[in-house]
Structure formats: structure tokens, C-alpha cells
Amino acid sequence: MLKVSQRTEYALRAVVELALRYGPGRVPAREIAEAQGIPLRFLEQQLSVLHKAGLVESFRGAGGGCRLARDPSTIRVSEVVDVMEGPFYPMYCLDPTDHTCFQDGRCGLQELWVDVHSAIRDVFERTTVAALALRHRRMAPDNPVWSPEDLFRPAGAN
Amino acid sequence: MLKVSQRTEYALRAVVELALRYGPGRVPAREIAEAQGIPLRFLEQQLSVLHKAGLVESFRGAGGGCRLARDPSTIRVSEVVDVMEGPFYPMYCLDPTDHTCFQDGRCGLQELWVDVHSAIRDVFERTTVAALALRHRRMAPDNPVWSPEDLFRPAGAN
DNA sequence: GGTGAATCCTACCATTGCAGTATAATTTCT
DNA sequence: AGAAATTATACTGCAATGGTAGGATTCACC
């Protein structure tokens, strides 16, 4: 109950990794998978979703990879979540297209679910990907970090 | 994703119904099921859970039924949710007994899930069953209501 | 003491969503 | 040509969920 899907967690981790390495360079999915401990083939699917939604740019072929389409500080967690999950409702009766509830909006519980929904949404909207990346850097400072000052490295190192 | 289970919705509806009819009388599950549109046999199971947790009293046999163990204004939604779902975590890494995450607490995302968790919990803790019942009465005034001040009315006036 | 109304207990089942794997096609750089 | 990468699609195993089923037990009342 009230669980976030692993897909979304992976997508967020991928986006955070891309934020940590934000710059003109391209990051292949394999490196994201290794850095974040995500099954590669599974990650590829989620990256594809993020790409179709315009959150990440991707380049095929050798030397290809992904990068964030916008600055991490302008990407809200809610965008990533929306892309991965579509419109979410803690209870089906909030779905305007759903009318299986026999009370259909006349129910006193609906307001509760609206409250839950906005509370969650609020967290997602006030948190940016840049903030997540910052937290990550603080909590795992031993992780490799490709910040702007590390951008010029020998080719092949991405 | 982030869905509330139907079980919990039913349990809350049942508790609201019991709150609307709070008093010395006993309400059989069948009446709750009819009033709230819940499959009877399924509801019985959830009522049993609520009973074991001490939230409702129940009486077997003819003339039996259930009633709330305490005044609805003293029962928080969080209690009902906890009873129905046990400890809930929006992401498994918040579960202190779970260590499947290879970063295990060193992850920048954990704070996000903590925020989500507390936001949801906050809603559940600040809402009482009495408040839900009041909303229900407002939204569906044509529903039968057995509140203390309505106990002595001409039959069929509801 | 029998009968019917009610809770209680346990097992079962069908569906669904989720996590992950597999296979292969396509693009691109060298 | 060949390696490296994304893209597309299909499939599988598993667990949770929502609900059903059958019966056992308890109790009031005639």
C-alpha cells in the first residue's frame, strides 16, 4: 500500500546520476547502471521513457549515451514521477474517468484522498533533481562525481 | 503506484458508518455492507481485523453486531490505516529491517521518501474518524443517519 | 433445545501489476 | 566491417490484491 514503484526509484536514480555528471558529455546507460546498481536492460527501458518525454536527450551508436535535456535545478521530481507513472491517484475514485464508486464523488472519504494526494504532490513539486543530486553528493562523497570542473578529460572517459 | 488498498478504503467506510451510528446499539455487518456498498464476506474479514486491534467491539449471535470501541472523535485515521496495513513505507529502503538496497541508507533519495512518508502520515494523523463522518453527513445528507440527536424521529424521516 | 442470525476462521482462486529477462533491430562512430 | 550504443517488443515469474467459499461457533429467543 502506498508504495512507490521500483521503476520510478530507478528513473530518479538515473536522473540524479545524470545530474551529477551534467554537462555536454554523454553518459551511456551502462555507466549509470553500474554507478546506481540498476539492471542495465531494465534501466534502458526507463531511460527510453524519460527520453520520449523530453527529459533526457539520447544519442545512439558508439560514443552515444544520454544527458539531461535541461539544467537539473529546473527539473522537479514531480516531472519525473509524472513521466514514469502517468497521473497518479491514491484512490481510484479521484480518477475523473472512473465511476466505479457507487457514491461517485458524494463520499466523505474523497476529501481525505485529495489531501493525501496533494501532500504527496507537494513533496514532489518542491524537490528538484539538483537538490537530490546535492543530497547524494553529501551522503556518498566517495562516489565518483563529474561536476563542471571535471568536464575536460581524455576522450573515451565520457 | 502510491495506491491505497481497497481493504483500507472499506475499513474506513465501515468505521465511518459505525461513527454515524455511534451509540449503545450494535450494527450488524450486513447493514454496514448495504449502506456502504461493500461485499459482505469481504467486509467481515476487515471488521475482524479491526476487532482484533481493539478499534471495534463485536458481539456474536442473534442481535449481535459491531460498534466503535471509542468515541469517533478520539480515533485517528492513522490508527485504522496502521491496523489494516501495518507499518507502511513508500519505498522499501525505509524499512529498517530491509537491507536489499546496496547503498543502504547512504542514498540521497531516502530523504525524499522520508518526506513523502511524513506528508502522508501527517494527513492520516490529523484527521479523525469523527471528521470523516461529519464530511460524509454533509456530502450525502440523504443517506440514513443515526446520530444521537436523530435517535428520536418519526420512522422513515431519513 | 432447536432455529436463525450473527461473528469468526481458514482456505482457496482469479486477476493484475511489477520487476526483470530475452531477442533482435537500428543507429553511429571509428 | 565492427563495436558500441539506443530502441522496440515480447515474454516470464512472482507476489499482492480483491474477492469467494465453506463451515464452525456463539448467542438470543421462542
Image: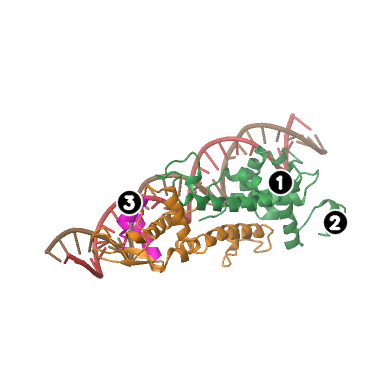
Chain colours: A orange, B green, C red, D brown
User: Residue at the location (76% across, 52% down)?
Assistant: B20
Residue position for label 1: B75
In depth, the one of B139 and B142 nearer the eye is B139
The percent coordinates of residue A23 (x first, y second) are: 35, 64
User: In terms of image quadrants, where is residue D23?
Assistant: top right
> How busy is the neighbourhood of tag 2: few (under 14 within 10 Å), some, or many (20 plus)?
few
The percent coordinates of residue D1 (x first, y second) are: 12, 64
> How busy is the neighbourhood of tag 3: few (under 14 within 10 Å), some, or many (20 plus)?
few
Q: Amino acid at mark 3?
A: Glu
Comparing labels 3 and 1, the label whose residue is closer to the camera = 3
The percent coordinates of residue A95 (x first, y second) are: 57, 64
Residue position for label 3: A34
Contact flag, marks 2 and 3 (Cβ < 8 Å): no
What kind of element bears circle 2?
loop
Same chain for the residues at labels 2 and 3, yes or no?
no
Stretch in magenta? A26-50
- Tell me the CA gap for discs 2 and 1: 30 Å
The percent coordinates of residue A133 (x first, y second) are: 43, 56
Position of residue B106 relative to residue A65, above or below, is above
User: In terms of image quadrants, where is residue A19?
Assistant: bottom left
> How busy is the neighbourhood of tag 1: few (under 14 within 10 Å), some, or many (20 plus)?
many
Q: Amino acid at mark 1?
A: Ile
Residue position for label 2: B155
Position of residue D24 relative to residue B156, above or below, is above
The quarter of the image holding the C terminus of chain B is bottom right
- Tell me the CA gap for discs 2 and 3: 71 Å
Picture disc at residue A95: none
Please, which chain is the residue tagged with disc 3 on?
Answer: A
Q: Is residue A8 visible?
A: no
